[in-house]
C-alpha cells in the first residue's frame, strides 16, 4: 500500500507554533520510516499559526531530505497558471524529482476575497476553469523534451530548438503561449494530486490526476468510489493503474497499533483504495512510524525503504525516471 | 568608523556575460544544479556580501528561438523557490528576488516573501518590477503590453497593498486593480518587513522608488550619470517624508578582475570573442525594443530610434553610449552584451577598488550590485581580490554587524 503523511503546518490550538526545525524533523522522521510522501497544507480554515507558505516551505524541505516525496497545496485562485507551473517545475529540479502539486477542486471563498475576486466563481465556472488551468500547467511541464539541453560550449548550442515546444493555449479563461523557462522535470512531470472532489469533479480527476485524495467513509462506500473512479479513468482512455487513490485517515493516539493496522489492512485488501493519507499530529508521528508501520511491514503490506529516487517511482507511476 | 559600502552578489544563469556559458571555466549546467547555487550563496556569504540578488522574467528572454538556443537564459530556477532553498543553506546573507507586479496578486506575493523572510529569519527582500516584455505578456493572456504609465499605476497600488499587509495595517483594500479583505495569516516579519528593492529609472519609476523603496538597483555607465541619478532620487524623498539615508542606491557593476591589468584584459577579450554576432545584435535589439536592427550594416552606426513603451531609461542610456563613443552596431552589441548596459570595469583589484571608491565617496552610490561575468570563477575573483582590497581601505565590512538584511543595509526597522 502507498502511504502519505499529511503535514498540517498550522499548529492546532494549544500547540506551539511550528518552526522550520520542528517541521524538518517531522519530515525527516517520515522519510526514515519510508513513507511515499508528505502532503503540506497551505491555508488553514481559521487564522493560521504557521509562519510559512507551502511552496516556499517545500523548497527548504527539499534541501534537508533526500528521498521522500514532497507535495504542497497551491490554489488555482492564488496563482496564475504560468507562475504556478514554474514554481513547481523549479521545486522538482531542486528536489531531484520528488515534488507534487496538490490542487483542490473546492473553491475557497477566503482566497477569492483576497485575490481580487470578491464575487468568486460559480461552481461550474470554477470547475471548468480548474480543468483548463490543470491542462495548461501539465502542458507547460512538457514544453521541453528530456534531451533538449545540449550544453555544447564549443558548438555554441545550449539547447536544441526543435526540442522546445510552445504551448499556444487559447481557452475560455486563459491564454498562455509558453514555453516554460524551467527545464524538464527529473521525474518527467511533477505529480498532480487532486482532492475536494464533488460528484461533477470525478471525471476531471479520473482524466487528470496522478493521485486522488478521498475523505474516509465506510468501507463499502470507499469501495464503490474506488471502483467508480477506476471505471471513469478507463472510460477516459487511461490505464486505471496510472493513478493512485488514497483515503484520508486520521490517526488518534488512543488507537491501538493492532486495531489501526487491522483497519488499514482490511480497507486495502478489499481493494477500496491504493493506500492512505495519514493525518497525524506532529507530536504523534512516532506512534505511527514506530508502532503501526512495523506491523504493516510484517504483514507484507508496505515496502521496505525506497527503491527509486523520485516521487513517481515511489508511487509506481510511469515516468519515474529511475523505476 | 567611515561609512562602508553595501554589496550585492547578483546571481544570474551561467553569468552576466551573454557568452558566459561557453567559457571553459563556466558551470554550464547552472540552471538545473541546485548544489551550484548553494556553493555560490555560501561563497558570497563567506565574503560578507549584504545580499544575493536574483532577477526574474516569466517567459523566455528572446523571441527568436534560434538566438535563444545559443544562450543559457531560456531555462533556470524560478527565483522564489531557489531562494527558499538557499534560505536554510545559509545563515547571514540577505536573499532578494525580483517579482512582477503585472503578473502577480499582492496578497499572494506579500505572503510568499514573508514566508521566505521567516525561513531565513529576516533576510528576505523583494525587487519590484513591472515587466516590460511582450514575451512575458503572452504567458498571461494579455494581447499586448500595457502602456508604461498604466503598469506603474498598478505597481503603485500593488506596493501599497503589500507594504500594508507586511506592516499589519488594518485590512480591507478595494482599489482600481486589487481587492484584499483579510490581513496576512502569517506572523510579522522578523525584520519588521522584508526589504523593498526597485530598479525602474524612468520618472514614474523614480517617484515610486522615492515613496516606497529601501534599495534602488540602477544602471549607470559614467560617474556623472550615476551622480545625477543619485541626487535626483534622494531629492525626491523629502516629498514623501523620508530621509535620504532611508534608501540605499546600488548601481550594477560588472567587473573583470585579475592579478594584472593585462590578464584582466585577456580574460575580458576571451569572453567577448565567444559572442556570436547574431546573438549580440539580438540582445541589443531587445533592449532597444526594435526588431529590425539586423537590417542595418553591422559595421555601421546605430540608426535613429523611436521612443518605445519598453525600457525607456535603458534605451536612452544605450543610445547615448553609442553616439558618445562612435561605436558600430557590432562594437556596441559586443560592448553591451557583456554587461547589459551596466557599468564594466576591467583591471586589477586596486583599479576596480579605485573606481568603486570614487563613486562611493563622490556621492554617486551607497554600494554596488556586483554582476560577475561568469560563475563561479568571477564571483570568486571579486571575493578573493577586490573584497580584501576594499577592506584594507576600510570601505567594506570584515564581518556582519547584525542578523537581518535590514541590519546589514543599515535600514530602519518599520514600526
Image (cartoon, rainbow, N blue to C red):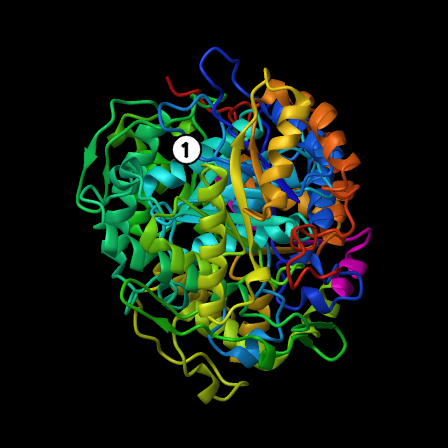
Residue A109 visible from this viewpoint? yes
| Number of residues whose C-alpha sits closer than 10 Å to that of mark 1, classed few (under 14), some (14–19) or many (20 or more) | many
| Residue B253 on the magenta segment | yes
Out of B371 and A321, give the one closest to the viewer: A321
Q: How many marks?
A: 1
Residue toward you, B198 or B262: B198
Above or below, A168 relative to B141? below
Q: Chain of mark 1?
A: A
Residue lying at 63% horizontally and 58% vertically, measured from the top left: B13
Give the left or right position of residue A91, taking residue A218 as reference. right
Report the side of A290 relative to A113 (left or right): right
Find residue A169 and report its horizontal and vertical position in percent: 38, 71
Q: Residue furthest top?
A: A14
Residue B52 can be seen, yes or no: no
Residue A212, horizontal then vertical, whole percent: 50, 49
Rendered image quadrant of residue B162: top left
Q: Quadrant of the N terminus of chain A?
A: top right
Q: Is residue B355 left or right of residue B28?
A: left
* Vertical arrangement, residue A200 with respect to residue B179, above or below: below
A22 w.r.t. B275: above or below: above
Which stretch appears magenta? B248-267
Residue B387 is situated, as x and y percent measured from the top left of the image, at 72, 38
Residue at point 60%, 63% (across, down): A183
The image quadrant that residue B110 belongs to is top left
* Residue B163 lies in the magenta stretch: no
Name the residue beneath numbered marker 1.
Answer: A43
**Residue B70 versus residue A100 in the image, above or below:** below
Provide the secondary structure element on which disc 1 rests.
loop
Residue under the image location 59 percent in, 82 percent down? A162
Amino acid at each position: 500500500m502507498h502511504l502519505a503523511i499529511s503535514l498540517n503546518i498550522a499548529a492546532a490550538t494549544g500547540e506551539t507554533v511550528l518552526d522550520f526545525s520542528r517541521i524538518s524533523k517531522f519530515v525527516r522522521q517520515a522519510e526514515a520510516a519510508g513513507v511515499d510522501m508528505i502532503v503540506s497544507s497551505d491555508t488553514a480554515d481559521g487564522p493560521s499559526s504557521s509562519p510559512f507558505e507551502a511552496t516556499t516551505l517545500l523548497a527548504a524541505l527539499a534541501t534537508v531530505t533526500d528521498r521522500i516525496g514532497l507535495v504542497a497545496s497551491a490554489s488555482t485562485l492564488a496563482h496564475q497558471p504560468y507562475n504556478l507551473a514554474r514554481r513547481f517545475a523549479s521545486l522538482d529540479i531542486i528536489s531531484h524529482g520528488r515534488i507534487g502539486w496538490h490542487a483542490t477542486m473546492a473553491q475557497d471563498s477566503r482566497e477569492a476575497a483576497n485575490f481580487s475576486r470578491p464575487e468568486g466563481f460559480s461552481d461550474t465556472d470554477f470547475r471548468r476553469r480548474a480543468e483548463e488551468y490543470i491542462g495548461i500547467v501539465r502542458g507547460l511541464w512538457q514544453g521541453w523534451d528530456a534531451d533538449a539541453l545540449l550544453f555544447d560550449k564549443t558548438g555554441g548550442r545550449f539547447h536544441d530548438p526543435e526540442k522546445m515546444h510552445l504551448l499556444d493555449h487559447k481557452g475560455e479563461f486563459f491564454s498562455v503561449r509558453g514555453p516554460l523557462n524551467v527545464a524538464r522535470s527529473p521525474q518527467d512531470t511533477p505529480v498532480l494530486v487532486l482532492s475536494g472532489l464533488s460528484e461533477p469533479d470525478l471525471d476531471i480527476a479520473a482524466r487528470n490526476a496522478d493521485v486522488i485524495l478521498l475523505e474516509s467513509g465506510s468501507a463499502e462506500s470507499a469501495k464503490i468510489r474506488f471502483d467508480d473512479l477506476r471505471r471513469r479513468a478507463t472510460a477516459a482512455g487511461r490505464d486505471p493503474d496510472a493513478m493512485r487513490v488514497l483515503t484520508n485517515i486520521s490517526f488518534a493516539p488512543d488507537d491501538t497499533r493492532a486495531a489501526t493496522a487491522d483497519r488499514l489492512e482490511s480497507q486495502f485488501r478489499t481493494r477500496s483504495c491504493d493506500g492512505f493519507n495519514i493525518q497525524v499530529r506532529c507530536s504523534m508521528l512516532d506512534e505511527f512510524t514506530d508502532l503501526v508501520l512495523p506491523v504493516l511491514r510484517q504483514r507484507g503490506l508496505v515496502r521496505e525503504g525506497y527503491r527509486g529516487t523520485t516521487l513517481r517511482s515511489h508511487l509506481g507511476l510511469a515516468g519515474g525516471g529511475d523505476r | 568608523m567611515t561609512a562602508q559600502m553595501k554589496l550585492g552578489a547578483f546571481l544570474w544563469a551561467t553569468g552576466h556575460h551573454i557568452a558566459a556559458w561557453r567559457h571553459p571555466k563556466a558551470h554550464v549546467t547552472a540552471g538545473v544544479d541546485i548544489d551550484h547555487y548553494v556553493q555560490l550563496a555560501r561563497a558570497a556569504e563567506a565574503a560578507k556580501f549584504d545580499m544575493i540578488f536574483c532577477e526574474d522574467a516569466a517567459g523566455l528572454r528572446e523571441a527568436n528561438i534560434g538566438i535563444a538556443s545559443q544562450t543559457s537564459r531560456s531555462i533556470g530556477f524560478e527565483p522564489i523557490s531557489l531562494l527558499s532553498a538557499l534560505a536554510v543553506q545559509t545563515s547571514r546573507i540577505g536573499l532578494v528576488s525580483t517579482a512582477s507586479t503585472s503578473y502577480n496578486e499582492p496578497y499572494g506575493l506579500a505572503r510568499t516573501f514573508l514566508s521566505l523572510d521567516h525561513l531565513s529569519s529576516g533576510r528576505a527582500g523583494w525587487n519590484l518590477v513591472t515587466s516590460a516584455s511582450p514575451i512575458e505578456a503572452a504567458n498571461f493572456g494579455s494581447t499586448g503590453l500595457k502602456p508604461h504609465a498604466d503598469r506603474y499605476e498598478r505597481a503603485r497600488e500593488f506596493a501599497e497593498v503589500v507594504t500594508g499587509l507586511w506592516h499589519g495595517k488594518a485590512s480591507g483594500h478595494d482599489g482600481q486593480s486589487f481587492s484584499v479583505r483579510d490581513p496576512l495569516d502569517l506572523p510579522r516579519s522578523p525584520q519588521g518587513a522584508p526589504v523593498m528593492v526597485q530598479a525602474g529609472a524612468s520618472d514614474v519609476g523614480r517617484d515610486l522608488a522615492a515613496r516606497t523603496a529601501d534599495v534602488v538597483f540602477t544602471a549607470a555607465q559614467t560617474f556623472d550619470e550615476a551622480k545625477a541619478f543619485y541626487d535626483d532620487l534622494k531629492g525626491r524623498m523629502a516629498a514623501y517624508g523620508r530621509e535620504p539615508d532611508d534608501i540605499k542606491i546600488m548601481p550594477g557593476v560588472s567587473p573583470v578582475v585579475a592579478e594584472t591589468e593585462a590578464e584582466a584584459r585577456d580574460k575580458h577579450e576571451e569572453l567577448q570573442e565567444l559572442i556570436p554576432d547574431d546573438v549580440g545584435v539580438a540582445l541589443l535589439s531587445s533592449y532597444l525594443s526594435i526588431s529590425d536592427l539586423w537590417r542595418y550594416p553591422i559595421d555601421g552606426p546605430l540608426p535613429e530610434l523611436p521612443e518605445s513603451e519598453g525600457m525607456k531609461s535603458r534605451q536612452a542610456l544605450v543610445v547615448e553610449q553609442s553616439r558618445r563613443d562612435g561605436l558600430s552596431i557590432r562594437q556596441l552589441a559586443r560592448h553591451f552584451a557583456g554587461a547589459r548596459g551596466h557599468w564594466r570595469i576591467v583591471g586589477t583589484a586596486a583599479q576596480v577598488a579605485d573606481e568603486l571608491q570614487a563613486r562611493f565617496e563622490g556621492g554617486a552610490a551607497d554600494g554596488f550590485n556586483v554582476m560577475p561575468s561568469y560563475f563561479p570563477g568571477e564571483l570568486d575573483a571579486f571575493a578573493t581580490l577586490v573584497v580584501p582590497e576594499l577592506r584594507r581601505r576600510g570601505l567594506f565590512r570584515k564581518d556582519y554587524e547584525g542578523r537581518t538584511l535590514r541590519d546589514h543595509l543599515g535600514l530602519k526597522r518599520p514600526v
